[in-house]
Amino acid sequence: MKKIYHLSTCDTCKRILKELDPPSSFILQDIKTEKITEKQLEEMQELSGSYESLFSKRARLYKEKDLKNKDLDENQYKNLILEHYTFLKRPVVINNDEIFTGNSKKAVEAAKASIHE
């Protein structure tokens, strides 16, 4: 599978997508207009190893719901991501059996190298 989950209204995602310059073989999914399915999230979790690694602790709702003071388990991370797209650490780049999550320079460089190898 070659897929990129992103948010079209996010300037950081736009910048990273431009930098990645994915070939046409990649499917782009705007998670705001096309919600992530449970199956898709489970596939991401299988590649990443945990729901927590896919979870964005920078989301506005994370602060609003005071989640930093709660001890969340894997199931809760999964349900929160399914509940609201902003909890997904973006972008998520899947290139066959590799996954790259988030917008750190390291993750973006690794994704770029993987896409264009």
Image (cartoon, grey):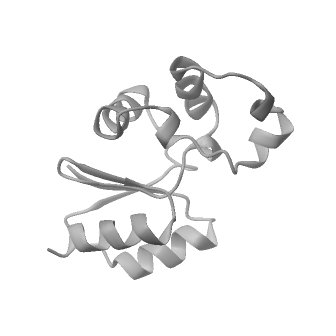
Query: Up-down: is 55 above or below 78?
Result: below
Query: Residue at the location (35% across, 40% down)?
Result: 48
Q: How many marks?
A: 0
Query: Residue at the location (57% across, 34% down)?
Result: 81
Q: x and y percent of residue 68 in the render? A: 76, 34
- Horizontal placement of 51 versus 55: left or right? left
Q: x and y percent of residue 96 in the render? A: 17, 51
Q: Is residue 24 visible?
A: no
Q: Is residue 93 visible?
A: yes
- Horizontal placement of 89 versus 64: left or right? left
Query: Residue at the location (64% across, 22% down)?
Result: 72
Towards the viewer: 116 or 72: 72
Query: Up-down: is 25 above or below 14?
Result: above
Q: x and y percent of residue 49 in the render? A: 35, 34
Q: Residue furthest left?
A: 117
- Horizontal placement of 32 versus 66: left or right? left
Q: x and y percent of residue 83 in the render? A: 62, 29
Query: Residue at the location (52% across, 49% down)?
Result: 31
Towards the viewer: 11 or 33: 11
Query: Up-down: is 78 above or below 87?
Result: above
- Horizontal placement of 53 versus 100: left or right? right
Q: Quadrant of the C terminus?
A: bottom left
